[in-house]
Amino acid sequence: MTQPFEGGRAKNFVVGLFDFRFRTMSALDAAPWIYLIAILGSLVAWGYGAYWGFTQSTATGLLWSLLIGPAIFVGVTVVTRLIIEFVLAILLLFVRLSETRDAVVQIVENTTDISAQTMGLPTVPSFARGIKNFVVGTDEGRERRRAAAKAQQARAEARASAELAADIAVATAVDEALKRTLEEAAHRAVQRSMEQQAATEEAVLELAVEATLDDDAVARDLTPDEPLDHSQESGQR
């Protein structure tokens, strides 16, 4: 995928925004911009949260700078990318299936036309007799014309049946691909969520351990001063 700042993609994106008839698909051009906005928004939230935390207390500022801010940034970017990739996969799938359907219908039409032209070619011995029957209008000629009309109708019905079968095959493939894509996206989202939760719990546990160690160190620093004060008071007495 190209960069969002390229001239052609930016121009297509701006033109697509004001296309009220929806004649063109601008989702592919808008995807990089949406992802860029999500990244910038998460960075702004990170910085604002750190600033607000330091205005409250040093511990809150460090918590926002080292734990909550990075978690928000990673979560927003991962979820946004998953949604964009999922939507683009569905759109590209429909485009490919539409192209496949058109190709199948074109092949069926070409096959039907070739078959009709081949069946209409007369053999050498019956060429003169066939012309006579069609011109004079004998019973045999009328039967041949009826048979040709029936064959043409049968070919039209076969072509319609082939188009219907192609539509059914495309719809079935779309359902299966959509179901498979939904399952994969849900599995990846659950896995990413579990990984982020585990990382958050580990970081909180580390901060709690560090806070406990700091409290113990402060308690040890304050403990020797009390006996010293008592000894000084006894000496003065």
Image (cartoon, grey):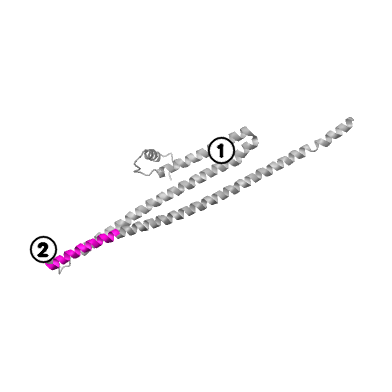
**Image coordinates for residue 173, horizontal then vertical, percent:** 40, 57
Indicate the quadrant where residue 53 lies: top right
The prevailing secondary structure element of the residues shown in magenta is: helix
Residue 230's place in the image compared with 80, above or below, is above
Dot 2: within a 10 Å radius of its alpha carbon, few (fewer than 14), some, or many (20 or more) residues? few
Give the number of callouts: 2
Given the current orientation, which residue lies at the most extreme left position?
136
**Circle 1: residue type:** Trp
Start and end of the magenta stretch?
A: 138-160
**Circle 2: residue type:** Val
Question: SS of the residue at dot 1?
Answer: helix
Look at the numbered discs 1 and 2 and tell me whether their residues touch, using CB distance below 8 Å: no
The residue beneath circle 2 is: 135
Indicate the quadrant where residue 206 lies: top right
Given the current orientation, which residue lies at the most extreme top position?
236
Indicate the quadrant where residue 125 lies: bottom left
**Image coordinates for residue 100, horizontal then vertical, percent:** 35, 55
The residue beneath circle 1 is: 46
* Quarter occupied by the N terminus: top left
Q: Which of the marked residues, 1 or 2, is nearer the chain's N terminus?
A: 1
Mark 1 and mark 2: span between their CA atoms?
Answer: 89 Å
